[in-house]
Amino acid sequence: MREWNHNTHHHGALLRLLPPRPESVVDVGCGDGSFAALLGQRCDTVLALDVDPVQVEAARRRCAAQSNVTVQEGDFLAAGLPSRRFDVVTALASFHHMPFEAAANEVVRVLKPGGRLVVLGVWTDRSTALDIVLNLISTAMNLVLRRLRGPDVMAAPATMPTMTLRQVEQSARHHFPGARIKRRALWRYTLTWVKPPL
């Protein structure tokens, strides 16, 4: 069976959130490069960035045949990427590994005017009845998917989020005015935002 996990399950939906044929993309926290490889099929150039050397090597192997994908070991917050350089910033289950404000400020800096941010985030909220229902649905869905596809495979180091989804929404309103946040199955949400043009 094809390997899958809670992030790869949403790859198709994430690709549909991209603008048509972006010129330059940075994939923050690229992990094993599975999404960077898909981006390489749709974008002119992709910079896949991760702090974990094991994941960087895995991503380099996965993307070795794609000359338009560059895999680099580094911290997004300290990489010194050029300002206003990228048409798209993607971050799959990596935003919660960084201080939200610092990550948001760096996204705003490196995105071109009119550029797009696409985040796949992790939620663990359990404070309302809706949270509990959605947790139960995700649990049931996870069991079905594991039966159909086998165990979910996640090699990258995992960290639980310290912010609730409601806190993410509040911070996004400040840093990414007009951002769209949608809660999704398997304890994930998407956050999309377009940087205002000059």
Image (cartoon, grey):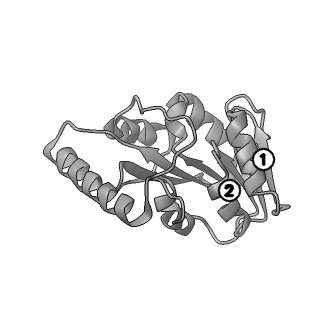
Asked if the residues shown at circle 1 and circle 2 are in contact, with their CB atoms under 8 angstroms apart, the answer is yes
Place of residue 69 in the rendered image (x, y in percent of width and height, measured from the top left) = 79, 56
Please count the marks in the image: 2
Q: Residue at x 73, y 34 (%)?
A: 53
Disc assigned to residue 190: none
- Judging depth in this view, the residue of 114 and 180 nearest the camera is 180
Residue 114 appearing in the image: no
Q: Which residue is the site of mark 1? A: 71
Viewer-nearest residue: 42 or 142: 142
- Badge 1, how many Cα within 10 Å: few under 14, some, many 20+? many
Left or right: 28 as drawn, with respect to 61? left
What residue is rendered at 57% in x and 66% in y? 15
Q: Is residue 46 left or right of residue 3?
A: right
Amino acid, disc 2: Ala
Residue 82, position as x, y percentages in the image: 80, 41
- Residue 39: horizontal and vertical position, in percent? 68, 62
Residue 194 is drawn in which quadrant? bottom right
- Residue 19 visible in rendering: yes
Query: What SS does tag 1 mark?
Result: strand
For label 2, the crowd category at 10 Å Cα-Cα, with few meaning under 14, some 14 to 19 and many 20 or more, is many
Q: CA distance from mark 1 to mark 2?
A: 9 Å
Q: Secondary structure at mark 2?
A: helix
Front residue of 187 and 62: 62
Q: Which mark is residue 36?
A: 2
Q: Earlier in the sequence, mark 1 or mark 2?
A: 2
Question: Whole-percent x and y of residue 4?
Answer: 50, 58
